[in-house]
Image: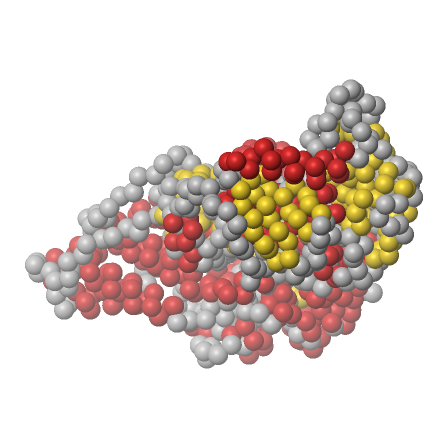
Amino acid sequence: MSSYATPIDPLILLAPFSGQTMPLAEVPDAVFAGGMLGPGLGFVPNEGHLLAPCDGVITQLAGTAHALSLRTDQGLHLLMHIGLDTVDMNGHGFQARVCEGARVRAGELLIEFDLAAVAARARSTVSVLTLSDAPEVRISPLSQGFVQAGHSAVLALQSGVAPEEPGAATSGATSGATSGATSTAAEGSLRRSLRLGTAGGLHARPAARAREAVRGFDARVELHFNGRSAALESVVALMTLDASEGELLELRGHGPQAAQALDAVAAVLGAADGDTTAATALPPSAAPQDPALASADGALLQGLCASPGWATGTLVHSKALVFVLPELSAQAQPDEQAGLSRALEQADRDLAEIAAQARKSQAFAEAEIFEVHRLLLEDPALHEAAYSLLAQGKTAGFAWHMAISNQIEALSRLQSARLKERAADLRDVEKRVLRALGHVPATQQALPPQAILTADEFTPSDLAELDRSKVCALLMSRGGSTSHAALIARQLGLPAVVALGDGLLTLPEGHEVVVDAGSGCVFTQPDTQDIARARNEGQRQGLRQARHRSAAHGPAQTLDGQTIEVAANIASLSDAHQAWEQGADAVGLLRTELLFMDREQPPDEEEQGDSYQAIVSALQGRPVIIRTLDAGADKPVKYLKVTPESNPALGLRGIRLAQRQPALLDQQLRGLLRVRSAGPLRILLPMVTELNELLHIRQRIDEIARSLQREDRIEVGVMIEVPSAAILADQLAQHADFLSIGSNDLTQYTLAMDRCQAELAARIDGMHPAVLRLIDMTVRGASQHGKWVGVCGALAAEPAAVPVLLGLGVRELSVPAPAIAEIKARVRSLDLQQCSEAARALLAMSSAQQVRIESQAIWPWPH
């Protein structure tokens, strides 16, 4: 490090890149964002030039020309890095215009690069400017937003002291290593050879990781290569060694903890078969790692977001409630039967009361779940199985447990994820009845404050019984993001992650963990910075949510004055009330399936009309889109008598089922056309694959409307859920009044990945460029006929996806009611013209990951 003596004037740095600036902490790379390479600034470049930010000397130029270091005349070291993971491009698309040792002036061209090639082949185009090896320097930002390379002043560097001599930072890195070795050699020293295993050699990021790896050890480490040496404290000095992948380095460690420090460096830089050899006696070993932590599957578990948010707390495994149930009854069969009947009635009363309380507190989704549990309690198949066992002399508790268990086993063999999730509801119903029978769990669990609770999968009753003052997050090894537990977690505002895998349940209890549920990440070995960040993010999130909710009833208007309709996805009258409370502009999707499920016969025309009318009236003139029955082999309705299919997602469902059973469709259409609304009433057709399907149903709607003497024309839309519909969007839009994209199905059919398959869950991403191209094709097809396009799938509720969808021309977003406030806030933060320009570039990306990284860099969120 340099030695400083007197104050110096501020050094003004010009923008090295043209484009959008971003805080370094928001750069999508842990090494840069974490400050391992020093403080600085991020850029999203819009042209392929890197210019000198000030006068200085080029001290290091990467062989692949994707990065360089510059020593200023004040002796400070600046690192400029183009894109992320661009070392893997092996120099393709990069052309250096300077060489090492060259003196340059501010604004001089240093490197030209092909921005399109970086966007297509690297992880991100986000580029950085950092100040290395100068902790005494204070950095002040001067500009933000769009900047012009070589003209806009972006940073002021102010040091309290001045260097003794120019270039001391470089020479100090080497000479300091020598002096350090001398002073600590008596305390223990060690040498090892190491074959460099980092792709691209010893460039900035592995150098920074190596430096971070030895922090906290009482030791000094140097790297020696090709007659030169550098101390690990200086990233710039390490880079100037110019060591390539596979070359042999020598590590020298000095101090009481030299062995541990060298181990840490070897873990970061070494090849899998790298040779290490000790030259002197080892100093005392470090304390062994906690064996339980060592057995965990790394320091990060990745799952799926069920409810977003940050949390930090103590990991606690939820103990399963164990009921000791005697099998054989000591009393007469009628007594056991009477006991079970009373327990069923008591459980039903309890559920009715819980549902009523939930509705009173406007927890409508929670209320609906417990109403479903009441329906399960009435299931005649369960009653028959239980009473049959009672006739064999079994106890009521044992008979009910076996009836439920057999039903769960049958559900587990089905392919439908929705029905598999019903198994968790059955377990819930089982426990409720057993309690009503007087059975008490063998164990009760006490929770510490700020508990992060884990389970294979939580049931709704588990969550209803939580001590919410102590639990701050939920983690599940299994489960889906649409399970009832996920819905309740969102209702409660608890961060929750599902599908984390079996490794979750092997983690040791009692350790502090950090949860970033929005990203589906669980950090099992966080440091103090991770914990502090989680706490800060949690506080900021609470403030943001309160701010968003306060503005939820206003229009969602972009910065350039365009109004976007933010609607709600609903399934019932209680959902309609919640949509009203949460500020929905409209209902973008009313699912009608709930009316048809869990019954022996379909609802007749009158019942359907009354149900739809109640929902429409509750919305007081807001536009409503009602989807016709989307049932079939993937959502079995027993009275429809659909033959089981090996691949129900590709079978008889949606509009195909309606064509097979026209009387069922006519009855629903007649119920819909009876509805009178103060606002627009629209009908949406699911799973349309070609124009003839639309024309046939459109004709039938018009015929029924005439028979009912309805004079106003009902608008009819088509769901774009399969690639064929997106490709034929121009044909469909000629006859449809609007198009609504069901992103969940469109994604699974485009990527040929079953969205009910847990192993593929992390890869089924609606931000995949193939899906985005189909959305783009849909919008362009609709625009030929002046028709609008909305999105009613999960993608619409993702803040990260909103600018992309708007940029592609989507003008309506229909989301779950709890997401309305944030999505409206997201829309208000965007410039529609800028979204349009940037979204076009994202279509050229090669993966969903690339799209997400770039979109976050362009449109950081949350604010």
> Which quarter shows the N terminus?
top right
Res. 188 in view: yes
Is 351 left or right of 133, judged from the image as shown? left
Is 691 left or right of 449, judged from the image as shown? right
Q: Nearer the viewer, residue 396 or 28?
A: 28
Res. 565 in view: no
The image shows residue 558, relative to residue 417, as above or below, that is: above
Which residue corresponds to the image point at 88% horizontal and 37% vertical from the top-left? Answer: 55
The image shows residue 142, relative to residue 346, as above or below, that is: above
The image shows residue 845, relative to residue 489, as above or below, that is: below
Horizontal and vertical percent position of residue 92: 80, 62
Residue 337 lies in quadrant: bottom left
Is 777 left or right of 748, judged from the image as shown? right
> Which quarter shows the C terminus?
top right
Horizontal and vertical percent position of residue 757: 50, 67
Which residue corresponds to the image point at 85% horizontal and 33% vertical from the top-left? Answer: 73
Horizontal and vertical percent position of residue 492: 47, 42
Residue 581 lies in quadrant: top right
Q: Nearer the viewer, residue 68 or 611?
A: 68
Residue 41 lies in quadrant: top right
Q: Exactly how many numbered labels are in the figure?
A: 0
Which residue corresponds to the image point at 32% horizontal and 55% vertical from the top-left? Answer: 429
Which residue corresponds to the image point at 34% horizontal and 39% vertical from the top-left? Answer: 447
The image shows residue 478, relative to residue 7, as above or below, that is: below
- Identify the image's colour scheme: rainbow, by chain, secondary structure or one colour: secondary structure
Horizontal and vertical percent position of residue 812: 70, 53
